[in-house]
Image (cartoon, coloured by chain):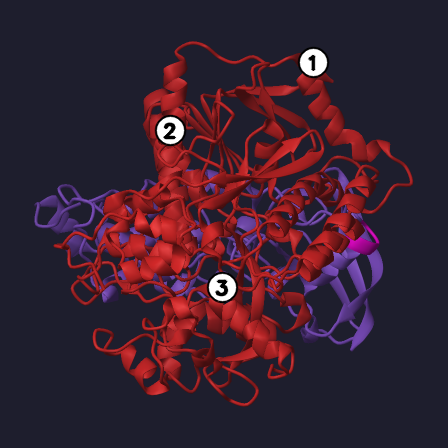
Chain colours: A purple, B red
Amino acid sequence: MSYDAKFRVWRGDADGGDLVDYTVEVNDGEVVLDIIHRLQATQSGDLAVRWNCKAGKCGSCSAEVNGMPRLLCMTRMSTFSETETVTVTPLRAFPVIRDLVTDVSFNYAKARQIPAFAPPEGVAPGEYRMQQVDVERSQEFRKCIECFLCQDTCHVVRDHETNKEAFAGPRFLIRAAELDMHPLDARDDRADFAREEQGIGMCNITKCCTEVCPEHIKITDNAIIPMKERVAGRHYDPLVWLGTKIGLRKR
Amino acid sequence: MTAELETYDYDVLIIGAGGAGLRAAIAARESGLRTAIICKSLFGKAHTVMAEGGIAASMGNVNSNDSWQVHFRDTMRGGKFLNSWRMAELHAKEAPDRVWELETYGALFDRTPDGRISQRNFGGHEYPRLAHVGDRTGLELIRTMQQKIVSLQQDDERESGDPESRLRVFAEVTITDLLQDPSGAVAGAFGYWRESGRFVRFNAPAVVLATGGIGKSFKVTSNSWEYTGDGHALALRAGSNLVNMEFVQFHPTGMVWPPSVKGILVTESVRGDGGVLKNSEGKRFMFDYVPDVFRGQYAQTEEEGDRWYTDPDRNKRPPELLPRDEVARAINSEVKAGRGSPHGGVFLDISSRRTPEEILKKLPSMHHQFKELADVDITKEPMEVGPTCHYVMGGVEVDPDTAAAAGVPGLFAAGEVSGGMHGSNRLGGNSLSDLLVFGARAGKGAAAYVQGLGDRRPDVDQAVIDAAAAAALAPFEEEGGENPYTLHQEMQQTMNDLVGIIRTAHEIERALDRLAELKVRAQHLTVEGHRQFNPGWHLALDLRNMLAVSECVARAALLRQESRGGHTRDDYPTMDPHWRGRNLICSAHGDAIEVREQPMSAMRGDLLALFDTDELAKYLTPEELAAVPAPATHTDGSRS
């Protein structure tokens, strides 16, 4: 049960590169990452690709397959016909280092800007009490494997290099939502931060991020929209505004 | 070349950014020292994220009978009494605090109805003990500590304007050699940026090895590419010792089909949550494989085993939850006897035991993994599973209290790369707790060592640096040499076939011959391309580590003439009490690996008293048994 497939893989570095054609064996049950590894072992020992777990749990092998942001280890070859050419290119939203490896440091810089979890005062370790139903909302976002496919596909990031400064991207908007919904986080300014520092207003909820998330996190519906509503409530709802002014609501 | 060598100075250098490395870094930084973390991958991708089941800690949230004493006892039983008892004691005592601490960093574990951290059952653990988040506990642990490290960097930024002033992560850097001063004390490390291939030198008087395991020496493994035994080999070459290397854990349930995912883990939680193992005749075969040492602790009928899930106080647990070595051997025997599944495994079935809703809630990532990779819906049909190389019990010989490595001042080790804690077999859930407990101890141990040095800093001869650089570049110099990928595959096949789950002297000797031959061939590797992100070159450098570690496994396996835990000898099929008190110690002398026996220290009386004499008699020699003090009366209620 094996056949020879046609592959086109982008080879190059920051100075430029090109799609290179390969013919390579494919066996029953294989995924795109297996084929990339076969190219490394048999035809092109220096083909650069990131990967770790090969089970969809670490989020390292992100790339674009036929133009779609995907995890290479979770893209089964059986989803393509035997005659189809499979094109593998690096994530487009980030600078190329070499071949399929991109510089994703943008994401680590954004991660460092978000104020950390603030432990509740006066609650000793071991004394934290939370209900399952309350932790589940944040747990959904903590499933994130940081593959950055959502960052790659988000047109705010992808199409406008200049937006990167002001916009944190879906991955870090769910981080803000996760902390906002954490039952014991002591800060109450997560929504303000999302508006003022993370540029949540730039998202126009096209849900592309949700579509590519390999963990099936409902990024837009469960994180971004509720956070936008909180922002709108705090800043544009006249009753809430009045409440904060006369001290009925905590800012 | 040396003029442009990129150089950094730190107090503590942590090699490895999995659970142990990150916890060590937090401890070293909180001790006020300038700390660097080296990651072979991107930050947050470490193999720890693959851990599914949970963190073992006797918090007693689900069953209040649990205590550190019971956890200690389970750990020693699981390791067949070969564990470093002091490590097992520290581990059992400190695990709860290390878990609770994670909540103060922001971790969100699953909860009990009264709002505490929920705990689940697992193989070899007497009570529900594993703190968990669905079946992605390792990811939660890594993300939590990653975010804690970011928060420490934010503190530093507020204080000094520079987030990396006291704690910096060097992502995608591989260390190829430790640097030592002429006396042998650690002075730093030498390596390369994977991205550019540029060399980098770290000066640091203390190095913590936290590099994980050696699974990539075997063909069928649950381990990622990073698991090439780097820390094991670095310690060996620096003059330290490896202990217990013959003990390799084959996890009983890895995927067996399709071929490309063979070896990927199927969490033990499937069995903890009700899944059962069946052969091709539909029989729950584990009832036939309860060994004498565990008879009396496991159910003898399916009815009793099934009642245990809802009434654990009055029933015994099903034998599917025996320690991993027992289950792996049983599966191996069933397949060998011709009662296997179509793809050479056995069936693991939860679909007939739990509702689809329960399965999706408790095992979401298993459902996802089988659906995506094998097109199997585990809520409707059984999985096919078989043993996969998962964990090495052996590792750097360390001081239990400080994690200091034997024989090399300034070298520390924690997590899978260290040895002793798990004896001959590790219990599920005891790895994540091990990472936290001994990661923290290694960070503190390294900090105390550096503080004890005062202003003294070990110095390295230039010749040492030049030699490290030359060794790393050797694969580019050779023309017409061998392909590193081919050599790697041959080594994996050798280890899998000849030093795998069942061993004999004859086969191990053949493996040693082949390894010797591979070692010679590995001197002449050729890689194409240049130094920028070149996986062929990276593999060529990792190969010498894998070969050294494989040789340790084979040599120790040949010497130990008994079967115990993760070491099964067909020619010596039983456990021999005379081997229990002896560790096998590997050391390197030039290119040669030597193995010697080393007696273990006797367990402290109060710890021995936690066991019945009847049980001790299964493990100890008559002479050792005679020396055991008479049992005292118990007040902790922990005796079973």
Mark closest to the chain's N terminus, 1 or 3: 1
Query: Residue B635: x, y in percent?
Result: 12, 54
Disc 3 residue type (three-letter): Asp
The subunit letter for the residue under badge 1 reads B
Q: On residue B173, which mark appears?
A: none
Dominant SS of magenta comes to: helix
Whole-number angstrom distance, CA of label 3 to CA of label 2: 32 Å
Q: Quadrant of residue B338?
A: bottom right
Residue that numbered label 2 is attached to: B445
Of circles 3 and 2, the one toward us is: 3
Element carrying mark 1: helix
Residue ranking furthest to the bottom: B281
Q: Which residues are magenta?
A: A40-44
Image mark count: 3
Residue B382 shows in the view: yes
Image quarter hosting the N terminus of chain A: bottom right
Label 3 packing within 10 angstroms: few (<14), some (14-19), many (20+) = many
Residue that numbered label 1 is attached to: B3
Mark closest to the chain's N terminus, 1 or 2: 1
User: Image point 70% across, 35% down: which residue?
Assistant: B592
Q: Are marks 1 and 2 in contact (CB under 8 Å)?
A: no
Q: Are marks 1 and 3 in contact (CB under 8 Å)?
A: no
User: Vertically, is B518 above or below B5?
Assistant: below
Disc 2 residue type (three-letter): Gly
In magenta segment, residue B251: no
Q: On residue B325, which mark appears?
A: 3
Element carrying mark 3: helix
Query: Residue A141: x, y in percent?
Result: 38, 58
Disc 1 residue type (three-letter): Ala
User: Image point 67% across, 45% down: which residue?
Assistant: B551
Image quarter hosting the C terminus of chain A: top left
